[in-house]
Amino acid sequence: MKDILTPRERFGLLVIDEEQDRVPVFPLVTGHAARAAGAALRDYYTDGRVMARSQLAAQERYGTDFISLFSEVGLVAEALGSRYSYPEDDLPILEQPRWSSLSEVPAESALFDSAGRLNVYLDAASYAYEARGDTVPILAYVPAPFTTAQQLVDPEAFLLGLVEDAAGVWRVLELSTRAVVGFCRQLIRAGALPILVDPLASGSVISVEHYREFALPAEAEVIRYLHRYDLDVVLHICGDTTGLVGAMAESGADLLSIDRIGLDAAIAQVGDRLRIIGNMDTTALWLSTPVEIAAETARMVETGRRNPKGYVAATGCEVPLATPEENIRAFVKAAKEAGRNDNFAAGRKR
Amino acid sequence: MAIPASGLMTREWPDPVPARIGFEEWAELFETIPDELIQRFHYFPPNQEQWSLYLFPPQTFAIYGCRHLRRLKFDNSLAALRMWGFVQNETERLFRARQTGRHVVACMGDLGALPVIVNSFPGCVAFYPDCIWWTPFVMESQVLFDAAAEQGIPEATCFSRAALGAFAKHSYFPDPDLVIAATGASCDDYSGVEQLAARHAREMLWVESPLRRSCGGVEPPTVEFLVSEYRRVVERLERLTGHRLSEEELRRGVARANRVRQAVAQLRQLAYGAGVLPALEMMVIEFGNLHFYSDIGEWTAVVEHLLVTARARADAGQRVVAEDALRIVWVTPPADPLLLCYLEDRGGRVVGTEFVINQALAPIDETKPGLEAIACSFMAASLIGTSRQRAELVLRQASERNAEGVLISGILGGSHCAMEARLIADRVKAELDLPVLEFDVAKPGAEIDRQTRTRIDAFLELLRSRR
């Protein structure tokens, strides 16, 4: 059945608490878009036009509801001085963090050493916006301050610092928060909606207490900035967030993107306040058959659409690079069918 | 309804030196606005919900698809920012109206009179789907035209067909509780849009707009007929709301509308006389007289804030358009707002308008019974008389403002535009010896088409040579 709404119209209704013609569908197709478009992965994350063209091609091919500009979480850290290598057919790899220990971090630091690959994202955002900004929301994933901080300082030293040197951690967090806000400012001007991703603040990496003490205040600071513009903010933390989801809601985010947590449990905890995005297991998406994926997706959507504040059918994390196309198509088709709202066109009653 | 205190605003965020600024400059400026100021302005006051905030910059609305905003120039005052934020979130406001238990009533075709009646009912919000005609241009998008085409309206029809697309989409405004559609001595393209929109309406009430025969004054039989039509509107609204409208409530409704009309009349004097506000903002302000952007209380505050700003500029001798700019009367609202910016960029300024909404600009006589007063004011309507009568409106403004030229922006496929433009142009040339430029506005796009730009440039050059 043909959609009534464009993805942008659909998202517009979701964020003002109105029913849509169907649930928005959002497999997190990021680097996989390069594969779908036949582009080299390194070109995807070093050339904004390639990133945009790949994303536009993937959005059209799979019929998803968002453009997903993203490659990896080192983006802001690189602009702040960390060094990355660029394998031809893989994502950037952290070669050398800017600092090897927290004690090296100065009290005050200049914001950006260089633009790094920030301009790649800005170019991609502008290009995608010009091409399809009237019909599809352009999402630009922005690594959150906590995740960025772990790319600026040797990760082991940083994680030890959570216990031994809170002041040192905060020095890095303040710098990365300023940088993330600055990058968001540029993305807003390019027409992209920043979505905050904080995978290294996951319950798989740190405790709930450390999340509350360090990651959450920095997320909240960025979200406060985005709310100055009345933007609807997505916070994505992948991995196990079972113990975190209540705290994540305190960040001020408007939509939570979740991964390895029961959808029912998330709805029970925050569904009265927040829209939920999630959370098909991406390993299953990669390795299952289309029939299995369709069945699992339908079950997920049936649960998700019970969320009082609204729901987006999504994968829990990024679609793996090698995921077969037919699997993504199976996910999208099943999510659209299970998420259809047959009462929409008939007119919504008071 | 509080008039904004300009002194308070000045302390918190002093307006910069008046100027027209671009998208990037507003982004820079917005960074300097304190959070407290953003938190102050809510629609549907005294409501204080976070969702009702609206002081947001063009960047916000660009992210949600209004791509044309990146190419426009805006007035740099706080009042103008407030106006843009308020106008741009009207879709959300209409949905919130429904969510908070208000009755949402769509008025179509008459452009100004029906909302005065609707807003007199407690808990009723009136809006014009007609105004969706700007949306394809603001979004640089064919989506609504494509949706209208699927409903049976082809490309060679007025841009107002976007309203039909919006009805079919159910996402630009909530499905109205009632649609009141004016037809008769009106735009026939839009009457076609109304007929097809009826398929999507829960309830449709048709109202006849009578033909005005004379060129001035009030025609008692016509007014009587209009009053009888408006009585049917009142009865239907009473059935919808379960509220019996008193004459006193109606008079208060008229007074509220008049308060806005009077403020806008003063703004027209200041802007078109002293050049204190740009033409684009003025078009938005004038069209606010139609339905007050779905919240008459807050829109009144916005307009009065603009008036405070305009007066302060006039008192200080500040302008946003050069004093020696070429003086133009603009006829028919340009569907593409970029045209107004372009005219000013190229050294022109608007000193008068005939945007087919004369009926919404005229004050309503508060000494008369409510419905009669509204009917009498509607007799000034641009579209219910002859082209000769409409030309009089143009001639009067051109004379008063010492205009140097008249520009008529037509609508491809809009039948009255094609018929009327030449008749108006001939009278302007014959009676005032002024050059007239006529062109049809091209379909939505990222920029003004080259032919139109060249024609505007040549027209301004001609006017310059006549000085």
Image (cartoon, rainbow, N blue to C red):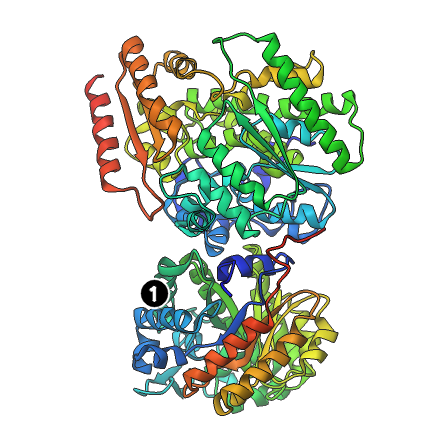
Q: Chain of mark 1?
A: A
The percent coordinates of residue A266 (x first, y second) are 69, 77
Query: Residue B424, located in which quarter of the rendered image?
Result: top left
For the point 69% across and 12% down, the residue is: B368
For the point 54% across and 7% down, the residue is: B217
- Mark 1 residue element: helix
Specify whether A148 is left or right of B332.
right
Residue B23 visible, this angle: no
Residue placed most toward the observer, B243 or A203: B243
Q: Write down the residue under mark 1.
A: A123
Image height of A349 relative to A128, above or below: above
> Residue at the left extreme?
B465
The percent coordinates of residue A188 (x first, y second) are 46, 59
Residue B65 visible, this angle: yes
The percent coordinates of residue A80 (x first, y second) are 41, 75
The percent coordinates of residue B416 (x first, y second) are 39, 26
Image height of B280 relative to A97, above or below: above
For the point 24% across and 27% down, the residue is: B460
Query: Residue A296, located in which quarter of the rendered image?
Result: bottom right
Number of numbered markers: 1
Residue placed most toward the observer, A261 or B25: A261
Q: Amino acid at mark 1?
A: Asp
